[in-house]
Image (cartoon, grey):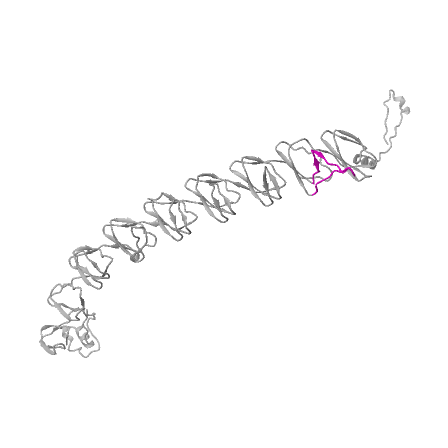
Amino acid sequence: FLLAFLPPTNPNTLPHTKLLRVQPVNRESEMSSDLHPAIIRLNPTQYAHILDNNTNVTRVLIGPLTHARQDHETKVFGPADMILVPPRHYCVVKNPVVKKEGKVVINTENKQVELQYGEEEIRLEGPPFPLYPGEQMPVGPTPLRVVPPQSALRLMALRDHEDNGVKRVAGDEWQFIGPATYIPRVEVKIVDTISAEVVQPGRALRLQAKQELTDALGEKRKAGEEWLHRKAGAYLPGVFEVVVETVEPLTLTDKRAIHIRALRTFTDEFGKQRRAGEEWLLTIDDCETHIPDVNEEIVNPALPLIVLTRKQYCVVLNAWDDAGRQQMGRKELRRGEMSFFLKPGEELESGKVNDVLVLNDDEALLLKANEPFEDDQGVKRTPGDRWNIVGPCEYVPPIEVHVLKQYRSIPLDENEGIYVRNIKTGRVEMVVGQTYLLKPDEELWEKPLPEVVERLLLQPSGTILRNLESDGPSGRATKRDKTRVVTFRAPHNTAVQVYDYKEKSSRVTWGPGLVMLGPDEQF
């Protein structure tokens, strides 16, 4: 109850105050009237859905409107604001209504709007519109996608349609190149965003074709084919082009070259035809930098320069001829001063650069001919010939000559000697008391002695008789040079008998004296 007191004009009038009674309010009926009002008022940008319980058809009320709801009608949605798509925006409506000549098609039998179930519709900027019963909006007003310069959208068709006069079938892919604003379509799906690759000067992009196409230069490419894009600047790959890598250049200098092999037959950047498996060199004379082609394999990116001084030489195996062809088995002698790169297939004999042979006046070289040729003195040599070169001089052996050894002359005192054997006749001679240089057909010969004599020769002269029957030497133990003439100093009051097996004669030397054995003599 609510008690209301009238303001008295006099305190004595209080007994005449009237008491007002207010009836209680039914909350359930009040809430029911709010959900289903009898009067529905719609602003110009509002709409509502009304269900006719008699026909079970839901219709749309669009403002501005004041609608008196009938008893068989129920408000199922609204009032709600209409969908407003601002400029440069779009939205997606699912199960859109069927329109004919811009008007919504209504079934004449049940007065129900016709819907395209399972379809979607892209709606751009325009007047506000309501959502009809059954329509859904999975994507609200969204800004249109702006494709910046040097980029593109990779699109794929979800169904057959026609795009600006171009017929597209499901699965087709193409590009939308910026700068531009992309207007979406329900038949098209955005697969990826492609950005342009910046090609720096002196570099290249290695591209691969996913299917047959025509590249930016107008050349036809097959599926799987690779090629290089060398033009500097921004490059936007095509929809069926894949950027494999960015190829860095190789720098050539005066001391470095590049060894290249062709993977397949092609024409290089210099316009020369290369066959599969062919190898060649690029030097600073050809170009300063080189970008390897897709048909090239870099065998050695930094082939060193070989430098020969005036005191050096080398022999190149499998050398190339003047016509630019490799001659297998061919040898070429090169002497400094010079510098060069080894061409493909060439190699240095023994893998190194040799020094020029410098001979003193007491040195010589023993040489042997491997092939017939004519030497510097005009002498014709045949294979197997042996001769020597005596110093002082500088000598570079030709490719037809093999150096057997370098040796010195042997100085001998009047009490010293050596055994020399002629390799052609087999005769052994004893050379004593002179400086001797072996001839080409001579070699030092080692004279064998019995073991007991070897032990005696190692004994001091005064102890020979005492140690004759001993097992080993008791004095100094030094090895004897068997190529030297065997000498023995006979002490005083001794005798030494020497027998020559070749002449079958003997001789006796009385001490003190020096005994020297000939090649065929024995103690």
Asked if the stretch drawn in magenta spans residue 113, the answer is yes
Q: Is residue 419 above or below residue 322?
A: below
In x, y percent, where is residue 505?
11, 78
Nearer the observer, 286 or 77: 286
In x, y percent, where is residue 298?
40, 50
Q: How many marks?
A: 0
Q: Residue furthest bottom?
A: 469
In x, y percent, where is residue 461?
14, 73
Q: Quadrant of residue 329?
A: bottom left
Nearer the observer, 140 or 498: 140
Nearer the observer, 39 or 233: 233
Asked if the stretch drawn in magenta spans residue 498, the answer is no
- Quadrant in the picture for the C terminus: bottom left
Q: Is residue 409 above or below residue 506?
A: above
Is residue 140 something that shows in the picture? no
Q: Residue furthest top?
A: 9
Q: Is residue 121 above or below residue 428?
A: above
Does residue 7 appear to the left or right of 49 in the view shown? right
Does residue 3 appear to the left or right of 317 in the view shown? right
Is residue 47 something that shows in the picture? yes
The stretch in magenta equals: 95-117
- Quadrant in the picture for the N terminus: top right
Does residue 250 appear to the left or right of 446 in the view shown? right
Could you tell me what secondary structure mostly forms the magenta stretch? loop
